[in-house]
Image: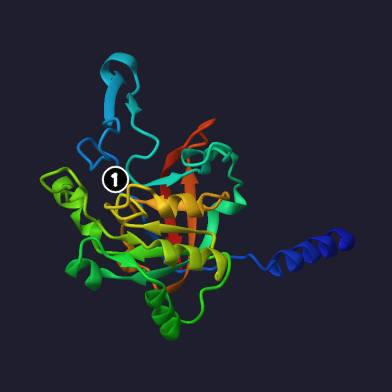
Amino acid sequence: MIIAVAQQARKAIIHNQQPNNITYSRVIHLSHLIDTGIPQWPGDPTVKFTTVAELQDDGYYLRRFSLGEHSATHINAPNSFHGNGISIDEYSAQSLVVPAVVIDICQRATENADYLLTVADILAWEAEFGTINSGNLVLLYTGWQDKWLDKNAFLNQDADGNMHFPGFGGDATQFLITDRQIAGVGIDTHGVDSGQNNNFTTNYLVLAKPRIVLENLTNLDQLPPQGATLVIGILRLRGGSGSPAAVMALF
């Protein structure tokens, strides 16, 4: 009996000494509700719900749903931009729990819908909040989350169909990868690349390795500049180019 108690106590001590323990007082949803009529990338499949069982007829309620892998709040996988990249089902569970920092460019995005994050923006943020540690996910808060319920404003297409929303600049992305060794990026617009970037520069750079790209996030205004931990829930779609994601922030 004494030996058993001692073993339990030893296990408790070892557990408490783990460096990856997470403590938090708040949990915030960073994912939009999935519904019909949400903003969709041009050409993407629409969201559909079909009732297949009713309580009064079948004794239970059940729906079937369909949507694109990059619909709503979602994560992109390397194979969506690199032929030899891994698919979404190959991400480890550990890689989907990551610390995050938030860079606010709302004012600049209000003045210029095509604004791109610069290295100077990153250095200014670090002068105030400290150097971005390796392994962090860098979230870009543009204010676009508030446009979600108005798909015209969210995609912000001009007369020629070109979209206008802010994103990560290529130089800033390369700096974050090379000099800060980040785990990935995220944003509250429909793309980490600006609406004007048809080359998907940031996606290509970040997903050259199995890092994280999150798009269509929300509630970024509720997060601290640093100190949050993200838990990213995915659908483990075999061969998937991405997945709708249930993202929660703990801090």
In the displayed structure image, the side of residue 59 where residue 237 appears, left or right = right
Which quadrant is the N terminus positioned in?
Answer: bottom right
Q: Position of residue 219 (x, y in %)?
A: 31, 61
Residue 146 is at least partly visible in this image: yes
Residue 181: x %, y % from top left: 57, 65
Callout 1: 10 Å neighbours few (<14), some, many (20+)?
A: few
Q: Nearer the viewer, residue 29 or 56?
A: 29
Residue extending furthest toward the bottom:
127
Residue at coordinates 58% horizontally, 53% vertically from top-left? Answer: 95
Element under disc 1: loop
The amino acid pointed to by label 1 is: Leu
* Residue at the extreme left of the image, as rendered: 159
- On the image, which quarter does residue 27 sit in? bottom left
Q: Is residue 134 left or right of residue 44?
A: right
When the figure is inspected, residue 124 is found, relative to residue 228, above or below; the finding is below
Residue displayed at 41% across by 61% down: 170
Q: Which residue is mark 1?
A: 33
Up the image or down, 61 lies above or below 136; here it is above
Rendering colour mode: rainbow
Q: Residue furthest right?
A: 3
Q: Is residue 247 visible?
A: no
Instruction: Pick the residue in front: 208 or 61.
Output: 208
